[in-house]
Image: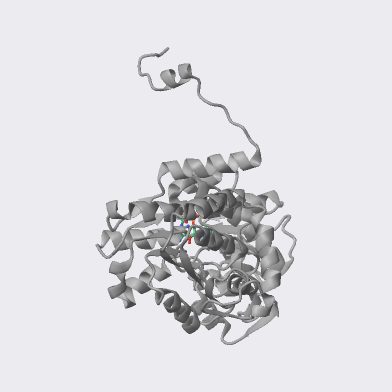
Amino acid sequence: MAVTQLPAHDVTDLALAAEGRRRVEWAEREMPVLRLIRERFDRERPLAGIRIAACLHVTTETANLMRTLEAGGASVALAASNPLSTKDDVAAALVAEYGISTFARRGEDRGTYYRHLNAIADTHPSITMDDGCDLVTLLHGERPAQVAEIMAGTEETTTGVIRLRAMAADGALGFPVVAVNEALTKHLFDNRYGTGQSTVDGILRATNILLAGRHVVVAGYGWVGRGIASRFRGMGANVAVTEVDPVPAIEAIMDGLTVLSMAEAARWGELFITATGDLNVIRAEHFAVMRDGAILANAGHFDAEIDLPALRQLAAGRVRSVRENVEEYDLGGRRLHLIVEGRLVNLSAAEGHPAAVMDMSFANQALSAEYVARHHAELGPQVYDVPGEIDREVARLKLEAMGVAIDVLTPEQVAYLSSWKSGT
Ligand SMILES: NC(=O)c1ccc[n+]([C@@H]2O[C@H](COP(=O)([O-])OP(=O)(O)OC[C@H]3O[C@@H](n4cnc5c(N)ncnc54)[C@H](O)[C@@H]3O)[C@@H](O)[C@H]2O)c1
């Protein structure tokens, strides 16, 4: 162990720390932007004296973000943002190799999940860092006296941003939050290419099915749905999309996909993946007409997209585990297969996004933490976009790390593009 005095923690097995460290270092090689930020933070210490409570998926990439925040001078406490996405070796490494207070056990029950959230809230943070808004919700709902102590927060994902906007509209939000998800260098790459690839990965690890020729239904054609559909199509699957918004539905058609209602798709599909951020997108009436052997998975933030209570009721106790991370629900002769209890399939059955995309997402997190530490006094209790300069800086650093040069506008082009006088 690299750390002699262990920080407060609750993890599954500290003996996994050395393996966790190797994997954190492997991810680091793919995270050059975060590394550059860490080196600068180490010199400038922009987060000196600040306590950060982070509720994020406990993965190798998150470990590198935590190291970056600590290099900036912050003291950090981390809890899992999902009971099934924790990598136990990474949690162990955070505590024993990097000395970062971590509360996360893969497979923790709901009570433990909230005990862990309360443990990081007990550190009295001045910045919150959330993925899905559970920490902010806990602070506002159960620990309102603490809200005034918090200078600002950041939020990683679409679902969390939706919740925060609803809180701000109700006048219920007590401090400013930067919506990291809204940065172009986050959702264009992480939600689309990161989730696209890692969802294929999670489904293959869980089932090892052939994708070529398979009927795949993707519910929701937002950033995540687009990425998933394009990756499954690239593997030779027949992809159909369901939507509630006519604009992305047309986009899916023009991208060469089939658009169906879920009532139609339920009969057609062999593999269903939800990516809407919505509730009960696949429900009893759909389970009732699905073919024998259909597989169900979710890539949206919460395990609410597939109506699990209805599925359990239809199976009436005829549920068994058929592979690691796959449960079979017998609906009286027809069997449906649910992957990782309907939780985020890419993080629960695989390792989440590749580090190269999390590099940009977490660069936005680190720079947004620095931004709110500097500017919180000028911000009200609203949801803010990541400043455009940060977004462009992340993209610039990523290109630099890739060794890719782009062109620079000539003075003549600058004048032309800002003039309204020239025409035909
Ligand atoms: N698995 C991951 O690693 C990961 C990564 C990023 C985001 N997410 C989560 O994935 C979800 C989607 O994120 P996004 O960025 O694509 O959001 P988005 O807002 O870009 O897209 C969601 C799409 O779903 C559609 N939709 C809503 N209800 C629907 C329904 N009942 N049926 C069909 N379509 C419906 C919407 O019209 C929209 O086009 C969110 O919960 C987000 O937090 C997960």
Seen from the viewer's position, the closer of residues 347 and 284 is: 347
| Colouring scheme applied when the structure was drawn | one colour
The quarter of the picture where residue 289 lies is bottom right
The residue positioned 47% from the left and 51% from the top of the image is: 44
Q: Is residue 214 above or below residue 282?
A: above
Residue at figure coordinates x 54%, y 58% from the top left: 68
Quadrant in the rendering for residue 298 = bottom right
- Residue 306 versus residue 177 in the image, above or below: below
Outermost residue on the bottom side: it is 317
Report how many numbered discs are placed on residues in the image. 0
Most extreme residue toward the top is 424
Instruction: Write the residue at 37% across / 68% down.
Output: 136
Nearer to the camera, 353 or 4: 4
Q: Where is residue 28 shown, x and y percent of the image?
A: 64, 56
Quadrant of the frame with the C terminus? top left
263 left or right of 349 in image: left
Counting from the top left corner in percent of width and height, residue 261 is at 51, 57
Q: Is residue 361 visible?
A: no
Give 138 or 78, whichever is nearer the viewer: 78
371 vs 49, nearest the viewer:
49
- Left or right, 269 with respect to 145, comes to right
| Residue occupying the point 28% across, 51% down | 378
Figure quadrant of residue 397: top right
Residue 105 x/y as whole percent: 57, 78
Residue 30 can be seen, yes or no: yes
